[in-house]
């Protein structure tokens, strides 16, 4: 990734960059990237990638429709890794509450629903 223009997501809450994590032979590592553009808006990064601005690490719900329309090409698909020896690390999703009393039955049901959605999308681990 250090030889290609990379479109990098910056978390709006704390300014950190979304790491480009990969797994090779069971070992996780963050790939060095050549930053071409930084944004805190994943849709902006997706449109930049569509318009040839570089490589972006996108969530499947953003990239999927663009891949289906052949506006984007996945670099690390399960059936084709172009000779790569590493695979992208799945993104982590967390649900946070201010305290245990905030974890009401409604919140518990919502978290359960999210877990089901992630499992259906193949993102549950």
Image: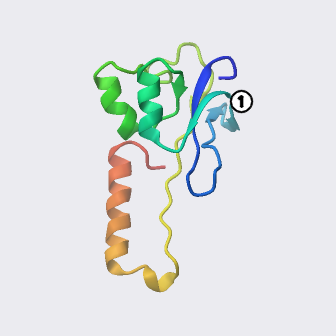
Residue 89 drawn above or below residue 94: above
Residue 89 drawn above or below residue 12: above
Figure colour scheme: rainbow
Q: Which residue does the numbered mark 1 point to in the structure image? A: 32
Front in this rendered view, residue 63 or 114:
63
* Label 1 Cα crowd, 10 Å radius (few <14 / some 14-19 / many 20+): few
What residue occupies the far left of the structure in this picture? Answer: 69
Q: Where is residue 34 in the image (x, y as percent from the top left)?
A: 68, 25
At numbered mark 1, what does the secondary structure look like: helix, strand or loop?
A: loop
Front in this rendered view, residue 23 or 64:
64
Q: Where is residue 46 in the image (x, y as percent from the top left)?
A: 43, 31
Q: Where is residue 45 in the image (x, y as percent from the top left)?
A: 48, 33
Residue 18 drawn above or below residue 4: below
Q: Position of residue 32 (x, y in %)?
A: 71, 30
Please state, as top left, top right, bottom left or bottom right, where the N terminus lies in the image. Answer: top right
Residue 43 drawn above or below residue 12: above
């Amino acid at each position: 990734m250090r030889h290609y223009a990379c479109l990098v997501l910056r978390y709006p809450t704390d300014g950190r960059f979304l790491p480009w994590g990969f797994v090779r032979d069971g070992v996780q590592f963050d790939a060095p990237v050549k930053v071409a553009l930084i944004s805190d808006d994943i849709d902006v990064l997706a449109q930049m990638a569509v318009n040839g601005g570089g490589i972006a690490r996108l969530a499947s719900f953003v990239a999927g429709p663009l891949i289906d329309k052949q506006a984007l090409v996945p670099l690390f698909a399960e059936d084709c890794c172009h000779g790569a020896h590493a695979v992208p690390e799945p993104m982590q999703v967390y649900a946070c509450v201010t305290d245990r009393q905030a974890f009401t039955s409604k919140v518990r049901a919502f978290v359960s629903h999210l877990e089901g959605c992630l499992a259906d999308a193949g993102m549950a681990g």
